[in-house]
Structures are given as structure tokens and as C-alpha cells.
Image: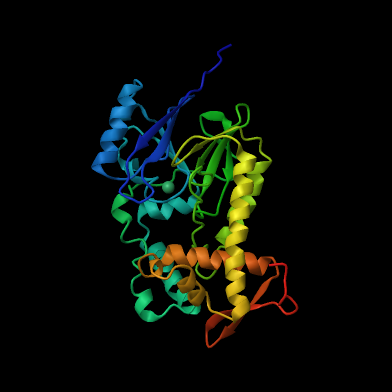
Amino acid sequence: MVVSKQDIYQITVPTPFPVGDVHMYLLTGDVLTLIDTGVKTKEAWEALNDQLKSIGYSVHDIEQVVLTHHHPDHIGLIDQLPKVQQIAAHAYIDPWLTRDQVFFEQYELFYEHFFKRCGVPDDVRDSLNGYRGMIHYIGTGEVTYELTDGDFLPGHAEWQVIDTKGHAQSHLSFFNKKHGTFIGGDHLLYHISPNPLLEPIDQVERAKPLLQYQANLRKCLSLGIKNVLPGHGPIFSNISSHITKQLNEQEERATVVYKMIQQKPRTPFEICQKLFPTQYRTQLVFTMSETVGQLDYLEADDKVKVSEENGVLVYHIKKGLGQSKF
Ligand SMILES: [Zn+2]
């Protein structure tokens, strides 16, 4: 009986983004798979080639790519791997790789309309450049094998797909139950708390990414994870204390927002300006995602309610909670 031996190698390449280096993982098995493909820069390409060489491989050996999510630091070099037969990922990654113009137009319209409802003034919304500023860091291709929660990775039967939406609507992680190893993309990071980003899920609906992210953090508590191989930062264990700390810190951030609404009803943009007095001008999607996330959390917790006044959302304290436990 042939017992296949599986090895995992971590490959680290630089990015031009504030997050710093990004990790990919080379997985041996029935096929040679690269999980994530870094960012599309010359520096990342050279680092990938050098590190593959140091472990006895080359880019010509990689047969399959598996992706954790669609952000540009994770899908960059995908079109520079000449022997790749299959790209396995969440379906939401496909429009990014294929440059689906209809998808991009709807994606940009979503932010335009939703931020208007959040009270973001025209001159601030004008600074939105959607996906366009990032597209040259992203490779081209097509998802040829769609992954969903509970699937096993093709060619790696011990690795199960875990839906970890929140940071991105395409986010998947990969878990080897036998070894307790979790390849977590940006879902579980040791040194930073991933920003659950607002994204449309279709033409009219948006996801509630902070709620998704928290539910998927709690799900991770029960999987039996021993080691996390993350997309950024150190490999780590001690999962339950890490997740508990993240959930507590988030509760503290929600308390700050609750107190603002206790003073007076406010629009999401008014809250965003108070939380991020300067950053909102240059990082509107990040800062509004954080703000709306806290509002979704407080609303789900029955602490606040929302009304619409002249087409703009306004958050109020729920009656009877003026002297809440906060
Ligand atoms: Zn990342």
C-alpha cells in the first residue's frame, strides 16, 4: 500500500501594501498545489522563484492553485505559473480573475449607492476608486473548480474547505483534521485583527461582514485547530485565547459606537468621522466597513435601531436602553 506523504512549505513574498509580507503555502500530495499566489510585482515573482528553488521545486512544477480570497495580495501571480491545470476557489473570485466588467460596474455602484444612504457627502464619495487602483496587482485567469464549505481539496483528500466569510465574501480556509492544521488566509491572523470589508453579495443586497466574521471565528473554536498557517505574520497556536481576545476587543469597539449614539442619533458617516477623523478621507471603504460593522453588531444585539430620513440611515438607541449595561 502506498502511503502518500504530505508536506507543507511556507513561501513568503513582499507586498507594496501596509500589511507587509504575504505567505503562500506549497502543498504536496496527488498534485502539487500552491495555496494563494502573492501580489503581481517583480519582487514577489523573484521571491517566489528563489524560495521554490531552495526547496527543490520550480514554478513549472505547480499543477494546481487554490485561493483563500480575492484580495490583490493573494491572487497576483496566478497567470505566471505555466503548468497550472486547475484553479480551485470560491466562485466570488472568478469575476476578479476574468475582469468581469458588468460585475465591476455593479460593485462600484453598490458603494456609490450604499455610502450615499450612509450620509457620505458627494465630495468624499468622489474619492472612491473601487477596484481600479488595485487591478494591476491581480493576475488573470478563471476559477475552474468551484469550492464550497465542506468540500475536500482536489488531490489533497485530508484537507477540508471551511467557509470563513467576513474579511472577504470569497474567503475560504483549509483544515487538516488529522493534524489540526488550519491554512487560514486572512481569517485568523496573530498580530492584527482582519477588517471585515463591506461588499455586495448581489445587485441590491450587502453582506454583514462583521457578523459573518464573528460567527466564523466561533466556528473555528470547535474545529480542533492546533496550528494556524496564516496569510500574514507568525504561525501560531492557542486558538481559543486568541479568538476570545478578538471577540472581547470587538465588543469594546462596539461600546464606543453605542456611547456616541447614546449622545444623539447619528448617521453611519457621522460615526465614521468621529472614529476616524482623518483616515476616512483616504480609506473610505476600510473606515466605513469598520463603522457599519459595529452598527450591524449593535443592531443584531438589539441595542440600536435604524430609521431612514430623507434617504439617509440614522441610528438610534433602542427605547428602554438609555441606561444600558454599557
Ligand atoms: Zn491579505
- Asked whether 325 or 161 is in front, the reply is 325
Q: Which image quarter is the C terminus in?
A: bottom right
- Asked whether 39 or 264 is in front, the reply is 264
Residue at 30%, 24% (x, y): give it: 53
- Asked whether 14 or 247 is in front, the reply is 247
Q: Which image quarter is the N terminus in?
A: top right
Residue 14 left/right relative to 304: left
- Asked whether 1 or 15 is in front, the reply is 15
The answer to which image quadrant residue 255 occupies is: bottom right
Count of marks, rendered view: 0
The answer to which image quadrant residue 74 occupies is: top left
Q: Position of residue 238 (x, y in %)?
A: 60, 36
Q: Residue furthest bottom?
A: 310
The answer to whether residue 53 is seen in the rendering is yes
Q: Residue furthest left?
A: 42
Residue at 41%, 55% (x, y): give it: 95
Q: Position of residue 181 (x, y in %)?
A: 57, 32
- Name the colouring of the figure: rainbow
Residue at 66%, 38% (x, y): give it: 223
User: In the figure, 116 relative to 90: above or below?
Assistant: below
Q: Position of residue 284 (x, y in %)?
A: 41, 67
The answer to whether residue 58 is seen in the rendering is no
Q: Position of residue 55 (x, y in %)?
A: 36, 22
User: In the figure, 137 relative to 109: above or below?
Assistant: above
Residue 21 left/right relative to 321: left
Q: Residue furthest right?
A: 320
